[in-house]
């Protein structure tokens, strides 16, 4: 019990440190935010200006923008750690590595959640979809989806951060793994926006939750090997 | 020597199986000659999955036992698996066009899943090239190999679901030959092709493993050389 | 393209690819 609490404390401390560094102006979130805004605009140009088509594509665009921005955000978070050797110091702590993973993923999740909420609002405005009408299921989707992005992203960012060509390797490794998340999140979002006529929303949310659980477990179990090398 | 015999047997088996699939077995009543693609397509897909399974097992064993031989097994599985995945996709496309009218059938979860598999394991192979230290490379690759293997069933399941909730009926299921009512000639030809491909796979796996071991040996020697020359430089100073 | 041409395309690439990979593997092994 006490070790578990110690792990949780450390995880929270790491997450808090990341969040504070972020607030103090390390700009991972701001960069990712404007990146996803630009992605949304470009999607609009690529598919527009037919309003009906844009509205139909909105759930897909929302999640693509979030996933792309997510790769940026998680890689920034890890880059900062290696720049000042902080990750190596973290590895010296006498706690299970999964606590470090949990902390980094939590910090990533906090940023992704903020990002998700803002981008959701932006999609509502840009593509004229009624976000307010289905706020609760949409929030659930965003929370579950951003947990998954942060869980997978943290893991792969930790893996690629010391590589040459990490800008290519991170998305190449991470995006295919996120495919089920994209699928489920887009389906859940469009179900929520459409008033869930087929009653499928719950199933997609469950799939998202299952994805999150599996990927968090896999990340926590293997992240330690990354710190060792 | 034994491996050479295996290679010879595999060569004969593939030749016979291809000849039977192309010239002996009758064409399918509904799909005509196009259905002959199914034999190599299914055999390739099976070996792709088998290879990636081997990669996953090798990865776990490396992390557990820290023996680079397991890493060589994992590498062999990934490289050969990527090849068979590409074959499966190519066969699926060549089959899909005459039967469904399109190269890419989004309603077919397997094709989409397989394409993602290709991306996952190409990433695995690229990652290996980017790390010089053998043990570090093995560890990083092993982690990617394990997570990729965990992801496969999730991808498959979610794509299946994605299509299933969307559209009720399945179109021209490729499984028709695998069902019990299919004529014995088709089933026999498929099993023969799978067996022939599996023999070839085994041969290639052994050879690829030998190559990986030889390369590892060289890497090791080069490292020792560098260490030794560094030490002589140190001593002469 | 006729059905037969698709069959040929599939078999040539797959069997040819297998042969090519095998030969490349032999070469790589010999150069070690």
Image: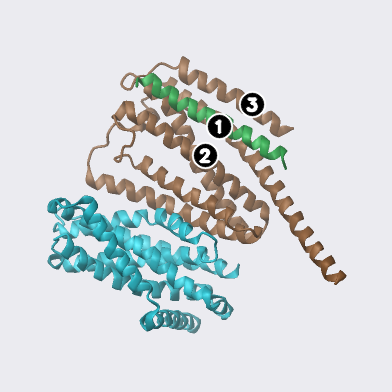
Chain colours: A cyan, B brown, C green
**Disc 2 sits on a residue from what chain?**
B
Dot 1 falls on a residue whose secondary structure is: helix
Query: Furthest-front residue in view?
Result: B237
| Labels 2, 3: front one | 2
Q: Marks 2/1: CA distance?
A: 8 Å
Mark 2 vs mark 1: tell me if same chain.
no
Identify the residue at horizontal 85%, vertical 72% (top origin).
Answer: B237
Say whether marks 2 and 3 touch (CB < 8 Å).
no
**Disc 3 sits on a residue from what chain?**
B
The image shows residue B233, relative to residue B42, as above or below, that is: below
Task: Report which residue position mark 1 lands on.
Answer: C18
Q: Position of residue B190 (x, y in %)?
A: 46, 27
Dot 3 falls on a residue whose secondary structure is: helix
Task: Report which residue position mark 2 lands on.
Answer: B83
One can see residue B211 in this view: yes
- Tell me which corner region of the image, top left, top right, bottom left or bottom right, holds residue A23: bottom left
The image shows residue A61, relative to residue B171, as above or below, that is: below
Task: Report which residue position mark 3 lands on.
Answer: B9
One can see residue A62 in this view: no
- Tell me which corner region of the image, top left, top right, bottom left or bottom right, holds residue A68: bottom left
| Labels 1, 3: front one | 1
Identify the residue at horizontal 51%, vertical 57% (top origin).
Answer: B144
């Amino acid at each position: 019990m006490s070790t578990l609490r110690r792990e949780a404390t450390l995880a929270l401390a790491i997450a808090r440190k990341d969040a504070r560094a972020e607030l103090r102006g390390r700009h991972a979130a701001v960069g990712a935010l404007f990146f996803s805004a630009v992605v949304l605009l470009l999607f609009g140009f690529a598919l527009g200006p037919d309003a009906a088509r844009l509205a139909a594509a909105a759930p897909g665009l929302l999640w693509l923008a979030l996933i792309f921005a997510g790769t940026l955000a998680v890689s920034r978070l890890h880059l900062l750690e290696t720049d000042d050797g902080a990750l190596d110091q973290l590895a010296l702590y006498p706690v299970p590595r999964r606590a470090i993973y949990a902390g980094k993923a939590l910090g990533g999740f906090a940023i992704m959640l903020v990002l998700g909420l803002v981008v959701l609002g932006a999609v509502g405005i840009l593509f004229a979809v009624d976000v307010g009408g289905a706020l609760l299921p949409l929030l659930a989707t965003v929370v579950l989806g951003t947990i998954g992005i942060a869980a997978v992203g943290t893991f792969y960012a930790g893996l690629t951060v010391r590589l040459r060509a990490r800008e290519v390797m991170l998305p190449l490794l991470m995006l295919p793994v996120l495919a089920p998340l994209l699928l489920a999140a887009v389906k859940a979002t469009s179900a929520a926006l459409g008033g869930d006529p087929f009653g499928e929303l719950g199933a997609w949310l469950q799939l998202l939750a299952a994805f999150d659980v599996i990927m968090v477990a896999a990340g926590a179990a293997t992240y330690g090997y990354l710190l060792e090398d | 020597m034994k491996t050479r015999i295996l290679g010879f047997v595999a060569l004969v088996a593939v030749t016979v199986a291809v000849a039977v699939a192309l010239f002996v077995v009758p064409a399918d009543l509904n799909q005509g000659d196009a259905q002959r693609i199914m034999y190599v397509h299914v055999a390739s897909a099976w070996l792709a999955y088998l290879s990636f399974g081997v990669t996953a097992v090798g990865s776990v064993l490396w992390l557990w036992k820290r023996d680079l031989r397991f890493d060589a097994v994992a590498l062999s599985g990934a490289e050969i698996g990527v090849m068979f995945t590409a074959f499966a996709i190519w066969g699926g496309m060549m089959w899909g066009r005459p039967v469904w009218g399109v190269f890419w059938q989004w309603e077919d979860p397997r094709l989409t899943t397989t394409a993602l598999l290709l991306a996952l394991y190409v990433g695995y192979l690229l990652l290996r090239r980017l790390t010089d230290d053998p043990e570090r490379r093995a560890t990083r690759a092993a982690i990617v190999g394990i997570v990729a293997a965990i992801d496969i069933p999730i991808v498959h399941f979610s794509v299946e679901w994605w299509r299933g909730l969307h559209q009720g009926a399945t179109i021209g299921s490729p499984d028709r030959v695998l069902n019990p009512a299919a004529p014995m000639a088709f089933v026999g030809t498929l099993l023969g092709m799978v067996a022939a491909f599996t023999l070839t796979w085994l041969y290639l796996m052994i050879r690829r493993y030998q190559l990986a071991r030889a390369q590892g040996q060289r890497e090791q020697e080069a490292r020792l050389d560098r260490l030794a020359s560094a030490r002589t430089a140190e001593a002469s100073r | 393209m006729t059905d037969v041409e698709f069959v040929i395309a599939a078999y040539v690439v797959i069997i040819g690819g297998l042969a090519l990979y095998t030969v490349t593997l032999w070469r790589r092994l010999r150069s070690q």
